[in-house]
Amino acid sequence: MPSATLRNHLLDRLSADDRKAILAASTPFEFELGHVFSEAGDAVAHVHFVLSGIVSAVAGMEDGRTVETFMIGREGVTTPAAIHVPVRTYSRLVGQSTGETRRIDVGRLRAICDERPGLRTMIALYSSGLQGELEQSGACNALHRSDQRFAKWLLRCHDRLDGDTLHLTQEYLASLLGSQRTTVNEAAQGLQKAGAISYSRGKVTILDRAALERAACECYTAGLRDTLEIPKQL
Ligand SMILES: [Zn+2]
């Protein structure tokens, strides 16, 4: 699938030489909904440049509850800190949809980054943007209502998936948002009433994107700024 190789936002912004080096050293990888890329605490062996679909970082608590802490789509790469030193994943990385990536051995990627400062800079900028998004999320979770966060989350999914319909179970949504099922249900009903989405039995269809943007908190735009405004290299 040659067209898929250039759909990653970071790869798109690399110089032609750096992009060629990554494409030569990586292999295409397809994942399914629920595919576990790594468990929390695993040493990172591979890094994935996401071409399509969503990879979620999901943190688990001792009582079994889980919550999504961030998502990676075609704007990013898994475990960007691994380009500097060997690292372990803090959360479980799991496919939230079907999708494709370019998969690269982490040692190989580190060696290429040593030779290509432009590539290292690009991944470090993404890593810094992700850190900013996480800091914003900390504030968001403390200060913003669950319906605003639900709208933000739907917009983020919509940005990363093709089409207007998302297939999600209520249990899954609740666990991703760290809310009770009833809270998610109320948030979805509110957005449906406003004409932003239609929602039934885990199927969410975005009907009015502008209305959804109005319903979301400011953190949606902040997240875009952090991870998407990375300059293109020549
Ligand atoms: Zn927020």
Image (cartoon, grey):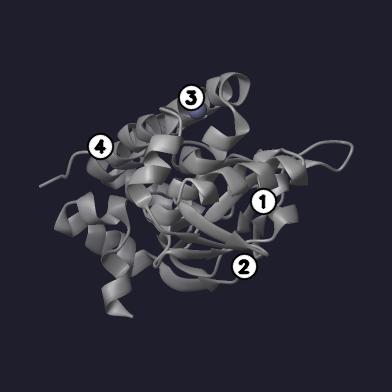
Front residue (pair 21, 40) = 40
Q: Tell which circle, 3 or 2, labels the residue nearer the N-terminal end.
A: 2
Question: Is residue 91 rendered to the left or right of residue 158?
Answer: right
Name the residue carrying label 2. Answer: 33
Q: Amino acid at mark 1?
A: Leu
Cβ–Cβ below 8 Å for labels 4 and 1?
Answer: no
The label shown at residue 229 is 4
Given the image, on which type of amino acid does mark 4 rest? Answer: Glu
Q: Which mark is residue 136?
A: 3
Q: Residue at x 45, y 51 (%)?
A: 195
36 to the left or right of 108: right
Q: CA distance from mark 2 to mark 4?
A: 28 Å
Note whether 46 is above or below 32 in the view shown.
above
Is residue 146 depicted above or below 2 in this figure?
Answer: above
Residue drawn where x is 38% and y is 40% of the image: 213
- What is the secondary structure assignment of the residue under circle 2? loop
Asked whether residue 29 is in view, the answer is yes
Tag 3–tag 2 contact (CB < 8 Å): no
